[in-house]
Image (cartoon, rainbow, N blue to C red):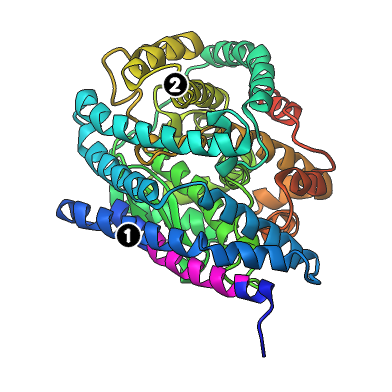
Amino acid sequence: MKMTNYQQLTRTFLRLSRFSHLSSIASWDMFAMMPPGGSQARGEALAEMSVLTHQILTDKQVGQWIDGAEQENLNDVERANLQEIKRHYEQASLLPEALVEAKSLAGSRCEHAWRTQRPNNDWEGFSQNLKEVVKLSREEAKLRAEAKGCSRYDALLDIFEPQMTSARLDALFADLKSWLPDLLARATEKQAQRTLIAPEGPFPTATQRELGLEAMKMLGFDFNGGRLDVSAHPFCGGVPEDVRITTRYNENELFSALFGVIHETGHARYEQNLPREWPGQPVQLARSTAIHESQSLFFEMQLGRSEAFLTRLLPHIVQRFGDQPAFAPENYVAWNQRVKPGYIRVDADEVSYPAHVVLRYEIERALIDGDIEVEDIPTLWDEKMQAWLGLSTKGNYRDGCMQDIHWTDGGFGYFPSYTLGAMYAAQLFHAARAALPQLNADIAQGDFSALFDWLRQNIWQHGSRFSTSQLITNATGEDLSARYFRAHLEARYL
């Protein structure tokens, strides 16, 4: 029996998803387990896989099947899947094979070198590799922008956050800038009136790992379909059936790794609960990077830093590290809700966190649009850190412009997702609280079932069936609004 156009497409995308599966696990291994000597060969293997999938995806036959499928009788989910298939096809078709391969190779090389260059504060060495990544990313952005009739940066932003534009981001971030600095100053001033006791280490890595695994268990992570490891930069990778999350440990600091694990568990629960009834299809994938970040920040900030959750976690901490004055309940909660501007984004409190994101957004947009060059980054970074947080990174590249992994592989357009995600998370938690009047009591009892059911019903099970705007409107009754984020910060910190 002859296959329909739509069936030909689903068969092709199932094949592509299997190649993507292998690439994901090979990438995880490269970040978490691979010995340094394997770097070049692994980079070449991943580049080869990128070329292969690009060839399959951009075959003219795929375009003909898409045209044919648009005339076929499809149900709502199939129609949504076809729309996503078309988006993937059009995105890929804009790029020549040689650019795909060169970008993959340059990204692997830059990331691998970054692992030693960052600890050595070697901006000079890092910037040489970054220049090549930026050059190739600009080529990509130019091709995409010409086809879409938009700015170069918007063309890259669209990959991570479909339908988002820098004009809309500028409006959202302008609103943020109008009230966040004052809120940050007031919260810092309020907390300065109180002296807190710092937890005393050392905190052995093995015991920190046990605590992280306990938190993952509390939060419903499926260990039959995932694992926890160590990497230079925390991340969540793998595939929905085999989710790999990582953190990094510091034996003098207890909570950084723990909340890194809780953050990545939010990503992982989303992946583990994506719909399985459309195997290998784009409609099965996470909606966007901002929705993905909304889930990790929902877990880490909305839930994880709440007094109810912190109190529930405390006995597990005392059991493993013994009692000490810092773990007195009031001190412990206040310590984990501190507002303290710092250099490192992944360790930032949720009030100062948006400053880290807006800073990176403004720099990467200027970089892609050609308004600045790689050499300009450190000075701009220092200026913006001083303006936002009163901290100087002059000469301190390790804790400044070299701290993140995203630019090493050309992930320009990703950073806004973090603050968009924080806004979505606040809006979702507000809606969940309205729908679940017993939520605080449930959290205090360690019962997250109703909350996770709500997330499953409203976000997780839909994959990419709806646009981001429609997904959030369905879940909360309105499109994205920053007012919930502001209300949350004011309620918790003022």
Q: In the picture, residue 49 is in which quadrant? A: bottom left
Find residue 224 and report its horizontal and vertical position in percent.
47, 72
Real-space Cα distance between discs 1 and 2?
A: 30 Å
**Image quadrant for the N terminus?**
bottom right
Q: Amino acid at mark 1?
A: Glu
Residue holding disc 2 = 370
Most distant residue in the left direction: 37
**Image quadrant for the C terminus?**
top right
Q: Amino acid at mark 2?
A: Gly
Q: Is residue 113 magenta?
A: no
Say which label, 1 or 2, has the lower sequence index. Answer: 1
Read off the magenta span: 9-24
Of 95 and 160, nearer the camera is: 95
Residue holding disc 1 = 48
Find residue 265 and report its horizontal and vertical position in percent.
51, 52
Judged from the image, the secondary structure of the residue bearing numbered disc 1 is helix
Q: Residue at x 21, y 23 (%)?
A: 124
**375 up-or-down from 154: above or below:** above
Res 448 seen here: no
